[in-house]
Amino acid sequence: MKKYVYFFGNGKAEGARDQKNLLGGKGANLAEMTNIGIPVPPGFTISTDACREYYANGNKWPDGLKEQIAENLRQLEAASGKKFGSADNPLLVSVRSGAAVSMPGMMDTVLNLGLNDNTVQGLIRKSGNERFAYDAYRRFIQMFGNVVLEMNHHDFEHILQAKKKKLRVTQDTDLDAKALKEIVAEYKAQVKKSTKKAFPEDPQLQLELSCNAVFTSWNNDRAITYRNLYKIPHDLGTAVNVQSMVFGNMGQTSGTGVAFTRDPGTGEHKFFGEFLMNAQGEDVVAGIRTPNPISELKTGMPAAYAELEKIYKTLEKHFRDMQDLEFTIEDRRLYLLQTRSGKRSAAAAVKIACDMVQEGMITKEEAILRVAPEQLDQLLHPTIDPKVKVKPIAKGLPASPGAAVGRVVFNAEDAIEWAEEKDIKVVLVRMETSPEDVGGMAAAQGILTATGGMTSHAAVVARGMGKCCVVGCGALQIDNDGKYFIVKEGPSKGVKVKEGDVITLNGSTGEVILGEAKLMSPELGPDFKEFMKWADATRRLKVRTNADTPEDSKIAREFGAEGIGLCRTEHMFFGEDRLMSMREMILANNEQERIKALKKLQPLQKKDFKGIFKAMAGLPVTIRLLDPPLHEFLPKGDKELKKVSKELKISVKDLQAKIVSLHEVNPMLGHRGCRLAVTYPEIYRMQSYAIFEAACELAKEGQRTVPEVMIPLVGMIGELTFTKQDVIRIAEEVMAKHKTKIEYLVGTMIEIPRAALISGDLAKEADFYSFGTNDLTQMTFGFSRDDIGKFLDHYLQRGLLKVDPFVTLDQTGVGQLVEFAVQRGRAVKPNLKVGICGEHGGDPASVEFCHRSGLDYVSCSPFRVPIARLAAAQAVLKEKKKS
């Protein structure tokens, strides 16, 4: 028979800390603590196998589980000297969840299980404390009712508050035994009223129902959301820990607390925590009462504190990491209920890792693996002060981290006017953004959109700017004309936010908060710099940045970028000094008119490139020639139409006709990228002249430049050959003119599946490949990255997708195309330079894939460069572990 249940107690356990996948993190660590002599109440763990089989069997226990629980319950009775269900000396237990990956507060717990009208009398006799017994009983009914019977928590709280009000007391601890006994009766009456059934008195039934509730809580909404947020697999399941109760609510010689072996906020090497006397664990965690700092325990109960101090040092040394402890003191006797690696801020994670290396506790390689790359986001952006309580009114997708506070505006023009002319901080709120909104996005503190996904325009541009951004906030109903939005669903339904009202965005969680929340500025201290030196010395992959301006380039350099992997030239055309010339070129009736307009743009482009080349100081710069369809540059709305009509001396009617003629049913697959260069070769020629004039002028000034010209959207070898010959001809012409030589490459972006499949042919012409994985993912899946938000949640919840494929690269499908293209390309050209420039370049799991696939570099938004650097180092160390 398969083993499902593992016992721990009396200094010996059947499990160990390396069995987290089987026993869950809590169960594995309870077993480990038991084995090393830490005072742990005895109990047993029901494995994650049982949970998975419970779901596979249609929410029924697998064969043999009931018998194994009964056998372990007998062992627990022997270890504790008490009997489950006894009216004389009752054994009470806690039933807690425990997944392989820590998910604090996401699943359910039941305490004091085994109480009924008979066993409570036995508890009174054994403890000699009637008040304590009825306090435990009312807590049990409330937790069981909420967790197992799915009753509303407020039904019980209402009864409790009414009793305190009637007796004119403020604290639960002020209620005497008589009042608590009355509350128990009222709770049970509420159970019968709500469920139409009496509260279950049979302890065996209570245990069975509670185990089922914990299994079921694996798939509650908050647990699913948490797993989606932290990319935890949905098929792991949870273990169930059944443990003999110890009581912190027996009076002033008992208590409970939570502590960390180091400060989880700062990383400071000091014991950190809180406790309450005469309380149970949920009182501390739920904030029912204000706890005391752990240092005060030293004065009130010096013996217990001394033992706790010894234990926390033992545990940190044993686990070689900062620990999060839960403890209970029952009548001056200390018990540990849990230890786990403590959740910590990014600043604390870096400091603790560095300190532990200096203390000789861990190696530099282990330190690198201790910090989650995603956490570094917290260090690079302002964040909401964690001490401040906030109330979100809506929630979207956390597209770009950090936090932003500002007054709401509803268009880019107002954002620029308010920010630049009135010096007012603004948050730009849009249904969705377009390239024309870039100026307003740059002026805003943060961006909020009602639609779009994690790689939508708003998300990509905001990350590049280092702006806080929340996208896909479907709860918002935006009225652009009225300049307000209404929250149309959720707890804050009906809330109206008008232009000029202040909101706060949390780009790390996706929360939209009404009013101003207090922000904290990022600080990159010496620990961070030292830590990143270790990462850089370990990694193989180079890390570049996606940057379109000298300012972004400088920021990226400061964050450790080793070049530019994607410079999007289209963003350069939206400036006030050049957008009209771009429109003039698009509206031209013949090649001569187009060339005339392009000549106005060429010196501006040259200036752009010189600024970027200077900022990168000799590092390679990959410049993508014009990619988007031309209609994106044309005016929208009557006001803008009239303005362009007047300036370019073209009738509104003709202008509208031109816009209609450029309209495409599916522009992402339409007239864009290299297809524009086939139709209008003069566009790429102008850009090529600007690139090489800028590079040659700087070369004559003694500055090295390494331009890498990238042809986008190539799907046929002929497209690359046709466009490349112009680039080379112009490069040679400009170098001859300036009597100088510069190093340059001409390559292509692999973003069409066919390009990956003909990689062997393309490599004959391309000096490098850069995978545009945003479009490659879109075309491989057939998903629109801007519309996937409408159904993505359903795919994630049903397990059809484990993660958003536009956030983490799909290694099974899209990844195969990447690997195939690399292999075929290098078979033809062994030294072919290969990188990735989609948003996946800043995603740790995708960076690890790029390392394994033999890419030379990844490129990402400036503010994700440190994340990619750390992820690349971790990829090396993980590979070493496997070999």
Image (tube, helix red, strand yellow):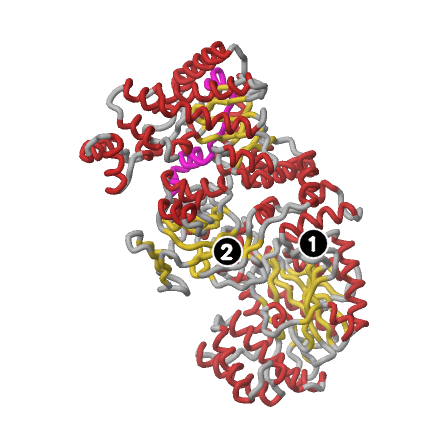
Image coords of residue 747 (percent x, y): 48, 21
**Foreground of the two, 322 or 564:** 564
Q: Residue at x 52, y 30 (%)?
A: 565
Q: Residue at x 72, y 66 (%)?
A: 336
The crowding category of the residue bearing disc 1, from other C-alpha atoms within 10 Å (few below 14, some 14 to 19, many at least 20), is many
Of helix, strand and loop, which one carries label 1? loop
Query: Is 168 included in the stretch rendered in magenta?
Result: no
**Foreground of the two, 341 or 70:** 341
If the image is split into quadrants, where does the C terminus sit?
top right
Q: Residue at x 46, y 49 (%)?
A: 446
Q: Residue 471, can we see it?
A: no
**Residue assigned mark 1:** 267
Q: Earlier in the sequence, mark 1 or mark 2?
A: 2
Image coords of residue 504 (percent x, y): 47, 56
Marks 1 and 2 in Cβ contact (< 8 Å): no
Q: Residue 287, can we see it?
A: yes
Foreground disc of the pair 1, 2: 1
Image coords of residue 165 (percent x, y): 53, 86
Left-right relation of 213 to 442: right
Q: Quadrant of residue 269?
A: bottom right
Residue type at mark 2 is Ile
Kindly report the distance in space between the C-alpha atoms of the residues bearing marks 1 and 2: 29 Å
Q: Which residues are magenta?
A: 760-786
Q: Which mark is residue 224?
A: 2
Residue type at mark 1 is Gly
Left-right relation of 755 to 103: left
Rendered view: 49 above or below 416? below
Left-right relation of 563 to 678: right
Query: Hey, which residue is sitting farthest front in the picture?
Result: 421
Left-right relation of 429 to 73: left
